[in-house]
Image (cartoon, rainbow, N blue to C red):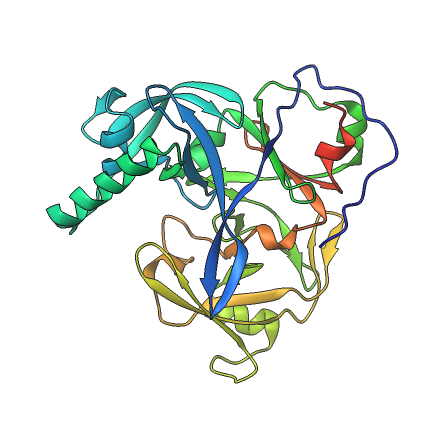
Amino acid sequence: MRALVLLTFSLPALAQPIRWAGMIWQPQNVAGQTIEHGALMLELHLDGAKTPVYMQLDTGCDADLVYRIAYEELAPEAARLGRDRIALNGTAAGQRFAREPFFIRREAGVSWVAKFLAAAGLHCNALKGKPVLVGTVGTPFLENRILLLDFVAQRLAFLDRDAELPAAIARLTNFVPISYRNHKIFVPLTIASVKQDGLFFDTGSSALLLTTTRLRWRNWTGGEPGDSRNTVFKVWSWDRYATLEGAPLKSALCLGRACFPAPLAFFESTGLYNFEFDRPPLEAAGLFGNALFEGRYTVIIDVPHQRFGLFSGSLAYSNPL
C-alpha cells in the first residue's frame, strides 16, 4: 500500500468549506492486466432518481452526456432543452447543481432486445439501491466550477467559481496558465527543454501518462513503431479498441516547477480517428492523464480563472475541513 505523506503545517480555512468525496474507480483490463484505477467515476444524486448514479469524470470529453436508456429509466421527468438535451438537477460530490444541460447520447445500432435488457438491468439495480453508470461529466461542467483532485488521499471536491483559495494554499501551489479551447484544457508542458502548448489534460485516460501522434512520439522517445521493447496496450475507446505503443521519453517532462523523469509516452498505431490529434478543429499535440500525479499531487483545475495547479501532497489531509 502506498504511504500517504501528511503535511505538518496547518492551513487556513476556505470561506467556502470543502466537501470532499471519495474517488470512485472502475477497474479496466489493459493488455491482460487489471488496472485498478482505470476510470474515475463521480457519484451524483439526481432529483427524481431513487438511488445514486455514477458518471465518468472525463475532462477529455467536450460534452456532458447522459445515456438515453438510463435517462428514460431513472430520470424521465428531467426538463427537455430540445430534442437531444435535458436539464438535470441534483448534487455532485456534495455540491448542488441546477438545470445543468446534458446531451442525450443515443445507442445507435442497438436492438430493441438489447435496449429492453439494459432497461431491465438498470431497473433491477435501482431497486437494489446499487448505483449505475448513466453518463459522462465532461469539461462543460467545469466551466463554472473549480475541481480539486487529491490523488494522494483519493478524494475530490468542487468549489464555486468565485471561491478563493487561502493565501497559504495558493503560495504552495504550482500554478500554470491554461488555454481552454474546443472544450479541452490545454496545459503547457516542457519536454526536452521545449515548451509544448498543445497537450490537454484528460481524466478519462487514467492509466496513461502521455499520448501523442506517431511523429511526435518518435521525436520525443527516439523509438520505432513495432519495436519489441515497446509497451503495447489495447484499450477500449469510444466503442472500439485502440492499440497503443509506448516507450520512455528521452528526457524529463515538466509541468511548471514539477518534473517527471522519462515517463512513458504512447501513440495509437492503427490510425483511429479520435487519436489523430492534429486534425481540425482540435489541432492538439496529444493528451496526458491522471497517472502522472498518482500518489504525489493534488490537482486544481480552475477553468473559470484559466489556471492549472499542482499541490505537492494531500490537500484533503492538510485542510482541516
Q: Residue at x 80, y 31 (%)?
A: 171
Quadrant into which the C terminus falls: top right
**Could you tell me residue 138's position as x and y percent?**
43, 38
Of all residues, the one furthest to the top in this rendering is 15
Q: Residue at x 76, y 22 (%)?
A: 166
Q: Locate residue 268, reporting x and y percent.
A: 43, 67
From this viewpoint, which residue is outermost toward the right? 8
What number of labels is visible?
A: 0
Q: Is residue 122 above or below residue 242?
A: above
Residue positioned 65% across, 23% down in the render: 18
| Residue 67 visible in the current orientation | no
- Would residue 17 appear left or right of 96 to someone viewing this image? right
33, 173: nearer the viewer: 33
**In the rendered image, which quarter is residue 49 located in?**
top left
Instruction: Establish if 32 lies above or below 289.
Output: below
- The picture quadrant where one finds residue 176 is top right
In the rendering, at what x and y percent does residue 290 appear? 58, 50
Screen quadrant of the N terminus: bottom right
Q: Residue furthest left?
A: 112
Q: Is residue 8 left or right of residue 237?
A: right
Q: Is residue 233 left or right of residue 85?
A: right
**Image quarter of residue 312:** top right
Residue 110 visible in this rendered orientation of the protein:
yes
Residue situated furthest bottom in the rendering: 228
Q: Residue at x 83, y 38 (%)?
A: 7
